[in-house]
Image (cartoon, coloured by chain):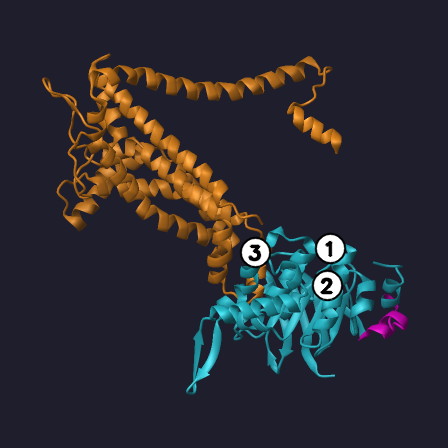
Amino acid sequence: MAFKIKREGRRKLRKNKHLPPQEKLIQLALFLATWSSVAALAAVFGELLLGAFPAFTSIDIIDFFTGTVWNPSHPMYPLYGILPLFVGTLMVSFGAALIAIPIGLGCSIWLAELASPRVKAIFKPAIEVLAGIPSVIFGFFALVILSEWIAAVFDPVTKLNALNGAIMLAVMMVPIMVTVAEDAMNAVPRSLREASLALGATKWETIRHVVVPASISGVMAAIVLAFGRAVGETMTVLMATGNATLLHFDMLRSVQTMTAAIAIDFGEVEFGSEHYHVLFLVGLVLFVITFLINFLAVWITKRFKEDY
Amino acid sequence: MTTAIHTDDLHVYFEKNHALKGVTMDIGMNEVTSIIGPSGCGKSTFIRCINRMNDIIPGCSVKGAIMVDGADINDDDVDVVNVRRRIGMVFQKPNPFPKSIYENVAYGPRLHGVTETVDGKVRRRKHTKEELDGIVEHSLRRAALWDEVKDRLDKSGTSLSGGQQQRLCIARTLAVNPEIILFDEPCSALDPIATAKIEDLLVDLKKDYTVVIVTHSMQQAARISDKTAFFYLGDLIEMGDTKQIFERPQKELTEQYITGRMG
């Protein structure tokens, strides 16, 4: 044991000096593969920072975060208030989460606990395929079909609105949630279910009091992950929400999200202009938000971990 | 001897595999009955029939009658939840819930509540905190675990040692106050000292409960049981007083098994 402790104390693996060269080559290749992805992430973050940096000096940063008007293309007095975009993003993604969480949870529970193996063998891959559909297809569907349905039911102010984007995003969130949450529930050992059933618990009581609590960290991570996806989704919301940049809280009116603003404006913005740098700043905010969400997912996974 | 469980021509099929081939057997009330036999002989399958745990295995079908208190619990019209409440089970591997020790024991009572008759009407209500505390303490005492855990009831059940976990699982089963308790190789994952504690407990429990235990250890069967049944390849070969089975087995297969020439 003393030997082991000493090893851990050094925190270094003992090296074999007699590895054949091809082994060293493979190890090097794997090492580079790992570092290239980390480097890419760092490069993206660095580029965002560099691009956004001039904006810190040319516009008032407090106005940027508190401004209620986003009108960057005004020839004389452009206004760069991020709030309409921020609220737009929150409306669409929280709306989507509100729809997707119950459906996704219900779907995960049904697949993990109730569906017969044969049915599950068809449904799970089908749902996973849904996660792989390009977002532009969802956007197209929202633009052409879903918006008409919403118009028929709610008679909205504008046909392309926050609700349209939220519903479509919810459809995209569900598969991500189900994939992760169902795996978490599946990982709960059968012996725990048997213990509960043998005490005279019904299936639902077992799900509620044993399976869900034991898998809660995975389920929460699934929700946060799906939410992160919703916040970062661009093409679908761009096509679905109508892209009006007014600040309001009406789900039946048009909104523009941060992602859509970047995607749309970047096509026409003058290179190196103030507007150009502000868009980088919006991108930086978005990056920080999704980073925090992912961080939250990791923290939740650890915090609520139940040992079984 | 009063009969607690009577099985009549019990067959179990897993898909096409005929795992239990017509077992007819009487299990005595307030006795310890051991079921022994080589791996794959159907002994676990048999006791899992008695509280309908085989229901949750896809492709498993159970044919035949299992009479408990004059009713066939294998009937399709029987409420399975009620059967499992009356017939508890302790499993091979200790499987405490990832909850506190207290919550592990309180799990069953919390689910079932108290059924009482008020003015001729049957009503169900939740346990009061005092009632629940009482049940938890009583069950843990009965499972000979109270003294070891009374100061840390809020600690996770999974933090206990293997033997303690198994006694916690027994306490959890006792808390719903069953009539019959089934043990599926409860000591196979435990060390000899923990095993001895569980064995003492089983013998003590038979005063109040009917105990059926599947075991791979013939010594264990000889030490604790009143009756022993020997299964081989899905058949009940022989059943009788434990002493008789181990000293004067009537069937050749039984003799071969207990003398270690087969198994």
The colour applied to the residues of chain A in this rendering is orange
User: Going by the image, does B24 lie left or right of A204?
Assistant: right
Residue drawn at x 73%, y 63% as measured from the top left: B198
- Which residue is identified by label 3? B97
User: Can you see residue B115?
Assistant: yes
Q: Find residue A68 and report its image quarter.
A: top left
Instruction: Give residue B12's position: percent from left, percent from top.
Output: 66, 66
Residue B198 is tagged as 2
Residue in the foreground of this view, choosing between B50 and B98: B98
Q: B97 above or below A83? A: below
Is B104 in the magenta?
no
- Which residue is identified by label 1? B190
Name the chain under label 2.
B
Instruction: Give residue B213's position: percent from left, percent from top.
Output: 72, 67
Q: Measure the C-alpha gap from mark 3 to mark 2.
A: 20 Å
* Magenta segment boundaries in residue numbering: B240-253
Residue in the foreground of this view, choosing between A101 and A299: A299
Q: Secondary structure at mark 2?
A: helix
Q: Amino acid at mark 1?
A: Leu
User: Can you see residue A269?
Assistant: no
Q: Amino acid at mark 2?
A: Ile
Q: Secondary structure at mark 1?
A: loop
